[in-house]
Image (cartoon, grey):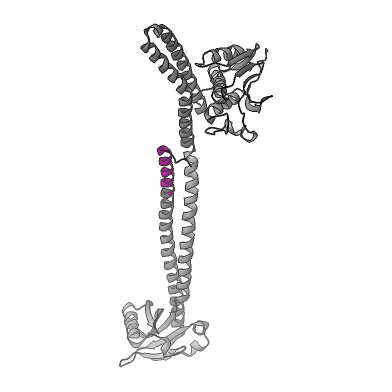
Amino acid sequence: MTPPTPALARLHRARWAMTLLFAATTAGCLLVLAALAVRTDGRSRMNDLDNGVSHRADGLARTVYYDGGTLHLQALREDDLARSAARLGILQASAHPPLRIRYARASPAALPDQEALDEIWRQVQHDQETVLVSAKVGGREIRWAAAPVWDNDTIGAAVLVGADPTRSQAAHHRLLRWLAVGCAALVLAAAAVGHLLSGRAMRPALRGLAQQEQFLAEAAHELRTPLATLRLAVESGRASPTRAPTALDEAVRLIDRLGRLVTGLLARARVGAGTQEVELTPLRLDQLVEQTVEELPDRTGVTVTTEAAIVNGDPELLAQAVRNLVENALRHGGGTPVEVDVTADRVTVRDHGPGVPAEDRTRVFERHVTGATSTGTGTGLAIVRWVAELHGGAAQLSPAPGGGLLAELLLPQHPSS
Protein backbone atom coordinates (compact mmCIF):
# COMPACT_ATOMS: atom_id res chain seq x y z
CA MET A 1 0.00 0.00 0.00
CA THR A 2 1.41 3.37 -1.00
CA PRO A 3 1.89 5.64 2.04
CA PRO A 4 -0.02 8.94 1.90
CA THR A 5 1.85 12.03 0.81
CA PRO A 6 2.61 14.69 3.45
CA ALA A 7 -0.05 16.98 1.98
CA LEU A 8 -2.65 14.19 2.06
CA ALA A 9 -1.62 13.28 5.61
CA ARG A 10 -2.09 16.92 6.67
CA LEU A 11 -5.56 16.96 5.13
CA HIS A 12 -6.45 13.77 6.99
CA ARG A 13 -5.16 15.25 10.25
CA ALA A 14 -7.14 18.42 9.60
CA ARG A 15 -10.27 16.34 9.01
CA TRP A 16 -9.84 14.51 12.32
CA ALA A 17 -9.13 17.80 14.08
CA MET A 18 -12.35 19.24 12.65
CA THR A 19 -14.22 16.10 13.75
CA LEU A 20 -12.85 16.37 17.29
CA LEU A 21 -13.60 20.10 17.40
CA PHE A 22 -17.17 19.46 16.22
CA ALA A 23 -17.62 16.70 18.81
CA ALA A 24 -16.05 18.80 21.59
CA THR A 25 -18.25 21.80 20.77
CA THR A 26 -21.34 19.60 20.75
CA ALA A 27 -20.28 17.96 24.02
CA GLY A 28 -19.74 21.36 25.66
CA CYS A 29 -23.16 22.61 24.57
CA LEU A 30 -24.82 19.39 25.71
CA LEU A 31 -23.07 19.55 29.07
CA VAL A 32 -24.36 23.08 29.65
CA LEU A 33 -27.89 22.10 28.62
CA ALA A 34 -27.74 18.92 30.70
CA ALA A 35 -26.52 20.85 33.75
CA LEU A 36 -29.38 23.32 33.34
CA ALA A 37 -31.86 20.45 32.90
CA VAL A 38 -30.57 18.64 35.99
CA ARG A 39 -30.65 21.80 38.08
CA THR A 40 -34.13 22.73 36.86
CA ASP A 41 -35.45 19.21 37.44
CA GLY A 42 -33.97 19.09 40.94
CA ARG A 43 -35.48 22.43 41.88
CA SER A 44 -38.82 21.51 40.32
CA ARG A 45 -39.02 18.23 42.23
CA MET A 46 -38.04 19.92 45.48
CA ASN A 47 -40.62 22.65 44.91
CA ASP A 48 -43.30 20.06 44.17
CA LEU A 49 -42.39 18.18 47.33
CA ASP A 50 -42.37 21.36 49.44
CA ASN A 51 -45.65 22.56 47.95
CA GLY A 52 -47.26 19.23 48.67
CA VAL A 53 -46.29 19.05 52.35
CA SER A 54 -46.88 22.77 52.99
CA HIS A 55 -50.36 22.71 51.44
CA ARG A 56 -51.24 19.61 53.43
CA ALA A 57 -49.89 21.13 56.65
CA ASP A 58 -51.77 24.41 56.06
CA GLY A 59 -55.00 22.55 55.39
CA LEU A 60 -54.71 20.40 58.51
CA ALA A 61 -53.78 23.48 60.60
CA ARG A 62 -57.23 24.85 59.77
CA THR A 63 -58.85 21.53 60.73
CA VAL A 64 -57.57 21.45 64.31
CA TYR A 65 -58.48 24.34 66.58
CA TYR A 66 -58.40 25.73 70.09
CA ASP A 67 -61.54 26.28 72.11
CA GLY A 68 -61.20 27.69 75.58
CA GLY A 69 -57.55 26.76 75.67
CA THR A 70 -58.25 23.18 74.66
CA LEU A 71 -56.86 21.73 71.43
CA HIS A 72 -59.45 19.74 69.51
CA LEU A 73 -58.23 16.99 67.19
CA GLN A 74 -61.46 15.10 66.50
CA ALA A 75 -61.72 16.36 62.91
CA LEU A 76 -58.49 14.55 61.95
CA ARG A 77 -60.30 11.22 62.04
CA GLU A 78 -62.53 12.18 59.11
CA ASP A 79 -60.20 14.46 57.16
CA ASP A 80 -58.92 13.05 53.87
CA LEU A 81 -55.69 15.02 54.15
CA ALA A 82 -54.98 13.42 57.51
CA ARG A 83 -55.84 9.91 56.36
CA SER A 84 -53.65 10.15 53.26
CA ALA A 85 -50.64 11.61 55.06
CA ALA A 86 -47.78 9.11 55.41
CA ARG A 87 -46.13 11.09 58.22
CA LEU A 88 -48.27 13.35 60.41
CA GLY A 89 -47.81 14.71 63.87
CA ILE A 90 -49.32 17.40 66.08
CA LEU A 91 -46.92 19.28 68.36
CA GLN A 92 -48.25 21.21 71.35
CA ALA A 93 -46.51 23.59 73.63
CA SER A 94 -46.26 22.50 77.26
CA ALA A 95 -45.55 24.42 80.41
CA HIS A 96 -42.39 22.46 80.92
CA PRO A 97 -40.05 20.96 78.32
CA PRO A 98 -39.96 18.66 76.46
CA LEU A 99 -42.34 19.60 73.68
CA ARG A 100 -45.48 17.50 73.76
CA ILE A 101 -46.47 15.25 70.85
CA ARG A 102 -50.27 15.25 70.91
CA TYR A 103 -50.77 13.09 67.84
CA ALA A 104 -48.69 10.81 65.57
CA ARG A 105 -50.38 9.07 62.67
CA ALA A 106 -48.29 5.90 62.68
CA SER A 107 -46.13 6.23 65.78
CA PRO A 108 -43.84 8.82 67.33
CA ALA A 109 -40.95 6.89 65.76
CA ALA A 110 -42.11 8.18 62.36
CA LEU A 111 -41.38 11.73 63.53
CA PRO A 112 -37.98 13.38 64.02
CA ASP A 113 -36.16 13.02 67.32
CA GLN A 114 -36.78 15.40 70.18
CA GLU A 115 -33.88 17.70 69.34
CA ALA A 116 -35.12 18.12 65.75
CA LEU A 117 -38.67 18.69 66.97
CA ASP A 118 -37.50 21.42 69.34
CA GLU A 119 -35.65 23.12 66.48
CA ILE A 120 -38.73 22.93 64.24
CA TRP A 121 -40.87 24.42 67.04
CA ARG A 122 -38.42 27.28 67.52
CA GLN A 123 -38.55 28.11 63.81
CA VAL A 124 -42.34 28.10 63.80
CA GLN A 125 -42.37 30.39 66.84
CA HIS A 126 -39.85 32.69 65.21
CA ASP A 127 -41.37 32.86 61.70
CA GLN A 128 -45.00 32.55 62.85
CA GLU A 129 -45.88 30.88 59.55
CA THR A 130 -45.43 27.55 57.85
CA VAL A 131 -41.77 26.50 57.77
CA LEU A 132 -40.01 23.89 55.62
CA VAL A 133 -37.09 21.89 57.04
CA SER A 134 -35.24 18.66 56.37
CA ALA A 135 -34.77 16.25 59.26
CA LYS A 136 -33.66 12.63 59.41
CA VAL A 137 -35.83 9.78 60.63
CA GLY A 138 -34.24 6.37 60.91
CA GLY A 139 -31.24 7.55 58.91
CA ARG A 140 -33.37 8.81 55.99
CA GLU A 141 -33.69 12.46 55.06
CA ILE A 142 -37.36 13.53 55.23
CA ARG A 143 -38.83 16.84 54.10
CA TRP A 144 -41.09 18.41 56.74
CA ALA A 145 -43.62 21.25 56.77
CA ALA A 146 -44.75 22.70 60.11
CA ALA A 147 -47.85 24.97 60.12
CA PRO A 148 -48.79 26.95 63.26
CA VAL A 149 -52.11 26.50 65.07
CA TRP A 150 -53.13 29.67 66.89
CA ASP A 151 -54.59 29.89 70.40
CA ASN A 152 -55.88 33.43 70.38
CA ASP A 153 -52.71 35.52 69.90
CA THR A 154 -50.15 32.83 70.55
CA ILE A 155 -49.04 29.70 68.73
CA GLY A 156 -50.23 26.83 70.85
CA ALA A 157 -49.53 23.93 68.50
CA ALA A 158 -48.11 23.01 65.12
CA VAL A 159 -49.16 20.53 62.47
CA LEU A 160 -46.14 18.58 61.21
CA VAL A 161 -46.39 16.80 57.82
CA GLY A 162 -43.50 14.87 56.27
CA ALA A 163 -42.81 13.43 52.84
CA ASP A 164 -40.12 10.98 51.79
CA PRO A 165 -38.14 12.38 48.81
CA THR A 166 -36.69 8.94 47.95
CA ARG A 167 -39.05 8.34 45.00
CA SER A 168 -38.48 11.83 43.65
CA GLN A 169 -34.71 11.43 44.03
CA ALA A 170 -34.81 8.07 42.25
CA ALA A 171 -36.66 9.67 39.34
CA HIS A 172 -34.09 12.48 39.34
CA HIS A 173 -31.25 9.95 39.24
CA ARG A 174 -32.95 8.12 36.35
CA LEU A 175 -33.07 11.42 34.52
CA LEU A 176 -29.34 11.87 35.18
CA ARG A 177 -28.57 8.45 33.74
CA TRP A 178 -30.73 9.01 30.67
CA LEU A 179 -29.13 12.40 30.13
CA ALA A 180 -25.66 10.86 30.37
CA VAL A 181 -26.54 8.11 27.89
CA GLY A 182 -28.34 10.54 25.59
CA CYS A 183 -25.49 13.07 25.65
CA ALA A 184 -22.93 10.35 24.94
CA ALA A 185 -25.01 9.09 22.02
CA LEU A 186 -25.47 12.61 20.69
CA VAL A 187 -21.75 13.35 20.97
CA LEU A 188 -20.95 10.16 19.05
CA ALA A 189 -23.57 11.05 16.45
CA ALA A 190 -22.18 14.58 16.25
CA ALA A 191 -18.68 13.18 15.79
CA ALA A 192 -19.91 10.92 12.98
CA VAL A 193 -21.81 13.76 11.31
CA GLY A 194 -18.85 16.10 11.79
CA HIS A 195 -16.52 13.53 10.24
CA LEU A 196 -18.89 13.13 7.30
CA LEU A 197 -19.33 16.88 6.81
CA SER A 198 -15.61 17.58 7.15
CA GLY A 199 -14.96 14.85 4.58
CA ARG A 200 -17.43 16.44 2.19
CA ALA A 201 -15.95 19.87 2.84
CA MET A 202 -12.48 18.55 2.04
CA ARG A 203 -13.47 16.81 -1.18
CA PRO A 204 -12.56 19.84 -3.32
CA ALA A 205 -9.17 20.02 -1.62
CA LEU A 206 -8.62 16.29 -2.10
CA ARG A 207 -9.66 16.56 -5.73
CA GLY A 208 -7.33 19.50 -6.18
CA LEU A 209 -4.49 17.56 -4.55
CA ALA A 210 -5.20 14.52 -6.72
CA GLN A 211 -5.29 16.71 -9.82
CA GLN A 212 -2.02 18.32 -8.83
CA GLU A 213 -0.31 14.95 -8.32
CA GLN A 214 -1.88 13.68 -11.53
CA PHE A 215 -0.61 16.71 -13.43
CA LEU A 216 2.91 16.26 -12.03
CA ALA A 217 2.91 12.58 -13.01
CA GLU A 218 1.66 13.36 -16.50
CA ALA A 219 4.10 16.25 -16.92
CA ALA A 220 6.99 14.00 -15.90
CA HIS A 221 5.75 11.31 -18.30
CA GLU A 222 5.46 13.76 -21.20
CA LEU A 223 8.68 15.71 -20.64
CA ARG A 224 11.06 12.91 -19.70
CA THR A 225 11.79 11.64 -23.24
CA PRO A 226 12.22 15.01 -25.07
CA LEU A 227 14.42 16.33 -22.26
CA ALA A 228 16.64 13.27 -22.42
CA THR A 229 16.83 13.56 -26.22
CA LEU A 230 17.64 17.27 -25.94
CA ARG A 231 20.48 16.48 -23.55
CA LEU A 232 21.90 13.90 -25.94
CA ALA A 233 21.73 16.35 -28.84
CA VAL A 234 23.49 19.09 -26.87
CA GLU A 235 26.19 16.71 -25.61
CA SER A 236 26.69 15.36 -29.15
CA GLY A 237 27.19 18.88 -30.53
CA ARG A 238 29.56 19.81 -27.74
CA ALA A 239 31.65 16.65 -28.20
CA SER A 240 32.00 17.00 -31.99
CA PRO A 241 32.28 20.50 -33.54
CA THR A 242 31.41 19.06 -36.94
CA ARG A 243 28.03 17.88 -35.56
CA ALA A 244 27.28 21.17 -33.85
CA PRO A 245 25.02 22.62 -36.60
CA THR A 246 23.03 19.38 -36.82
CA ALA A 247 22.80 19.14 -33.04
CA LEU A 248 21.70 22.78 -32.86
CA ASP A 249 18.91 22.15 -35.37
CA GLU A 250 17.84 19.07 -33.40
CA ALA A 251 17.90 21.07 -30.17
CA VAL A 252 15.73 23.81 -31.68
CA ARG A 253 13.26 21.19 -32.91
CA LEU A 254 13.15 19.58 -29.49
CA ILE A 255 12.70 22.93 -27.78
CA ASP A 256 9.75 23.67 -30.07
CA ARG A 257 8.30 20.30 -29.17
CA LEU A 258 8.82 20.98 -25.47
CA GLY A 259 7.03 24.29 -25.85
CA ARG A 260 4.05 22.56 -27.44
CA LEU A 261 4.12 19.90 -24.70
CA VAL A 262 4.10 22.51 -21.95
CA THR A 263 1.26 24.36 -23.65
CA GLY A 264 -0.70 21.15 -23.93
CA LEU A 265 0.00 20.19 -20.30
CA LEU A 266 -1.16 23.56 -19.03
CA ALA A 267 -4.27 23.39 -21.19
CA ARG A 268 -5.03 19.90 -19.90
CA ALA A 269 -4.51 21.00 -16.31
CA ARG A 270 -6.84 23.99 -16.75
CA VAL A 271 -9.49 21.87 -18.45
CA GLY A 272 -9.26 19.23 -15.74
CA ALA A 273 -9.57 21.90 -13.02
CA GLY A 274 -12.60 23.41 -14.76
CA THR A 275 -11.01 26.83 -15.26
CA GLN A 276 -10.89 26.53 -19.04
CA GLU A 277 -13.15 24.98 -21.64
CA VAL A 278 -11.56 22.85 -24.33
CA GLU A 279 -11.74 24.54 -27.74
CA LEU A 280 -12.58 22.09 -30.52
CA THR A 281 -11.80 23.29 -34.03
CA PRO A 282 -11.96 21.47 -37.37
CA LEU A 283 -8.56 19.94 -38.19
CA ARG A 284 -6.98 17.39 -40.52
CA LEU A 285 -6.45 14.33 -38.36
CA ASP A 286 -4.22 12.64 -40.96
CA GLN A 287 -1.84 15.61 -41.13
CA LEU A 288 -1.74 15.92 -37.33
CA VAL A 289 -0.77 12.23 -36.97
CA GLU A 290 1.92 12.48 -39.65
CA GLN A 291 3.44 15.57 -37.99
CA THR A 292 3.30 13.98 -34.55
CA VAL A 293 5.08 10.81 -35.73
CA GLU A 294 7.63 12.92 -37.64
CA GLU A 295 8.55 14.74 -34.41
CA LEU A 296 9.23 11.53 -32.47
CA PRO A 297 12.93 11.28 -31.51
CA ASP A 298 13.02 7.59 -32.42
CA ARG A 299 10.56 6.59 -35.10
CA THR A 300 12.51 3.68 -36.52
CA GLY A 301 10.13 0.93 -37.54
CA VAL A 302 7.07 3.20 -37.55
CA THR A 303 5.02 3.34 -40.73
CA VAL A 304 2.07 5.66 -41.24
CA THR A 305 -0.86 5.05 -43.57
CA THR A 306 -3.44 7.80 -43.79
CA GLU A 307 -6.51 8.94 -45.59
CA ALA A 308 -8.01 12.40 -45.44
CA ALA A 309 -9.94 12.80 -42.19
CA ILE A 310 -11.44 15.91 -40.61
CA VAL A 311 -12.47 15.96 -36.94
CA ASN A 312 -13.34 18.59 -34.36
CA GLY A 313 -10.55 18.62 -31.82
CA ASP A 314 -7.84 20.34 -29.86
CA PRO A 315 -4.59 19.84 -31.80
CA GLU A 316 -2.29 19.82 -28.78
CA LEU A 317 -4.37 17.32 -26.82
CA LEU A 318 -4.88 15.03 -29.82
CA ALA A 319 -1.16 15.18 -30.60
CA GLN A 320 -0.36 14.09 -27.05
CA ALA A 321 -2.81 11.19 -27.30
CA VAL A 322 -1.35 9.98 -30.62
CA ARG A 323 2.21 10.41 -29.35
CA ASN A 324 1.42 8.36 -26.23
CA LEU A 325 -0.09 5.55 -28.30
CA VAL A 326 2.91 5.35 -30.66
CA GLU A 327 5.54 5.65 -27.91
CA ASN A 328 3.70 3.02 -25.89
CA ALA A 329 3.81 0.64 -28.86
CA LEU A 330 7.51 1.37 -29.48
CA ARG A 331 8.42 0.92 -25.84
CA HIS A 332 6.38 -2.19 -25.07
CA GLY A 333 5.92 -3.87 -28.45
CA GLY A 334 9.05 -5.93 -28.12
CA GLY A 335 11.00 -4.01 -30.77
CA THR A 336 8.55 -5.05 -33.48
CA PRO A 337 7.38 -2.75 -36.30
CA VAL A 338 4.67 -0.28 -35.40
CA GLU A 339 1.96 0.50 -37.91
CA VAL A 340 -0.12 3.68 -37.61
CA ASP A 341 -3.29 3.87 -39.66
CA VAL A 342 -5.61 6.90 -39.91
CA THR A 343 -9.15 6.57 -41.22
CA ALA A 344 -12.17 8.87 -41.13
CA ASP A 345 -13.00 8.35 -37.46
CA ARG A 346 -10.05 6.66 -35.79
CA VAL A 347 -6.32 6.36 -35.29
CA THR A 348 -5.10 2.76 -35.02
CA VAL A 349 -1.66 1.86 -33.70
CA ARG A 350 -0.53 -1.75 -34.05
CA ASP A 351 2.48 -3.51 -32.68
CA HIS A 352 3.51 -7.15 -33.02
CA GLY A 353 4.37 -7.73 -29.39
CA PRO A 354 2.88 -10.17 -26.87
CA GLY A 355 -0.37 -8.18 -26.50
CA VAL A 356 -2.46 -7.60 -23.38
CA PRO A 357 -4.61 -10.19 -21.55
CA ALA A 358 -8.35 -9.66 -21.98
CA GLU A 359 -8.86 -8.90 -18.28
CA ASP A 360 -6.33 -6.03 -18.46
CA ARG A 361 -7.52 -4.30 -21.64
CA THR A 362 -9.85 -1.94 -19.81
CA ARG A 363 -7.93 -1.68 -16.57
CA VAL A 364 -4.71 -0.41 -18.19
CA PHE A 365 -6.48 2.83 -19.12
CA GLU A 366 -6.76 3.68 -15.42
CA ARG A 367 -4.14 5.94 -13.92
CA HIS A 368 -1.12 4.39 -12.23
CA VAL A 369 -2.03 0.87 -13.40
CA THR A 370 0.69 -1.36 -14.85
CA GLY A 371 -0.21 -4.01 -17.36
CA ALA A 372 1.26 -7.46 -17.38
CA THR A 373 2.83 -7.35 -20.82
CA SER A 374 3.06 -4.54 -23.29
CA THR A 375 1.34 -1.58 -21.70
CA GLY A 376 3.71 -0.01 -19.16
CA THR A 377 2.43 2.55 -16.67
CA GLY A 378 -1.15 3.68 -16.92
CA THR A 379 -0.33 7.38 -17.11
CA GLY A 380 0.15 7.51 -20.89
CA LEU A 381 -2.87 5.38 -21.75
CA ALA A 382 -5.00 7.17 -19.16
CA ILE A 383 -4.21 10.44 -20.95
CA VAL A 384 -5.29 8.84 -24.23
CA ARG A 385 -8.65 7.81 -22.77
CA TRP A 386 -9.14 11.22 -21.13
CA VAL A 387 -8.46 13.04 -24.42
CA ALA A 388 -10.77 10.68 -26.31
CA GLU A 389 -13.63 11.16 -23.86
CA LEU A 390 -13.08 14.92 -23.88
CA HIS A 391 -13.65 14.83 -27.65
CA GLY A 392 -16.74 12.61 -27.34
CA GLY A 393 -14.86 9.50 -28.42
CA ALA A 394 -13.26 6.47 -26.81
CA ALA A 395 -10.01 4.54 -26.53
CA GLN A 396 -9.75 0.76 -26.65
CA LEU A 397 -7.34 -2.13 -26.96
CA SER A 398 -7.97 -5.33 -28.90
CA PRO A 399 -5.90 -8.27 -30.16
CA ALA A 400 -4.48 -7.77 -33.64
CA PRO A 401 -5.03 -10.43 -36.32
CA GLY A 402 -1.96 -12.65 -36.47
CA GLY A 403 -0.71 -11.47 -33.03
CA GLY A 404 0.15 -8.19 -31.42
CA LEU A 405 -2.01 -5.38 -30.08
CA LEU A 406 -4.34 -2.84 -31.68
CA ALA A 407 -4.70 0.45 -29.81
CA GLU A 408 -7.46 2.62 -31.20
CA LEU A 409 -8.37 6.27 -30.67
CA LEU A 410 -12.00 6.69 -31.83
CA LEU A 411 -13.22 10.20 -32.65
CA PRO A 412 -16.53 11.56 -33.99
CA GLN A 413 -16.35 12.63 -37.61
CA HIS A 414 -16.71 16.26 -38.59
CA PRO A 415 -20.15 16.92 -40.19
CA SER A 416 -18.49 18.00 -43.45
CA SER A 417 -16.58 14.72 -43.82
Q: Nearer the viewer, residue 266 or 68?
A: 266
Q: Is residue 410 above or below residue 139?
A: above
Q: Nearer the viewer, residue 316 or 37?
A: 316
Q: Position of residue 277 (x, y in %)?
A: 53, 22
Q: Position of residue 232 (x, y in %)?
A: 42, 17
Q: Nearer the viewer, residue 47 or 151?
A: 47
Residue visible at 44% across and 56% down? 30
Number of dots carrying numbers: 0
- Can residue 285 be seen in the rendering of this structure? no
Q: Position of residue 276 (x, y in %)?
A: 51, 23
Q: Identify the image quadrant of the C terminus.
A: top right
Assign the magenta stretch its main secondary structure.
helix
Residue visible at 50% across and 20% down? 264
Tell me the magenta residue range.
Answer: 1-19
Where residue 309 sits, quadrant-wise, is top right
Q: Position of residue 385 (x, y in %)?
A: 58, 27
Q: Is residue 66 above or below residue 214?
A: below
**Residue at far right of view:** 401
Residue visible at 52% across and 25% down? 271
- The answer to if 4 sits in the magenta stretch is yes
Q: Nearer the viewer, residue 68 or 186?
A: 186
- The answer to if 80 sits in the magenta stretch is no
- Can residue 38 be seen in the rendering of this structure? yes
Q: Is residue 407 above or below residue 310?
A: below
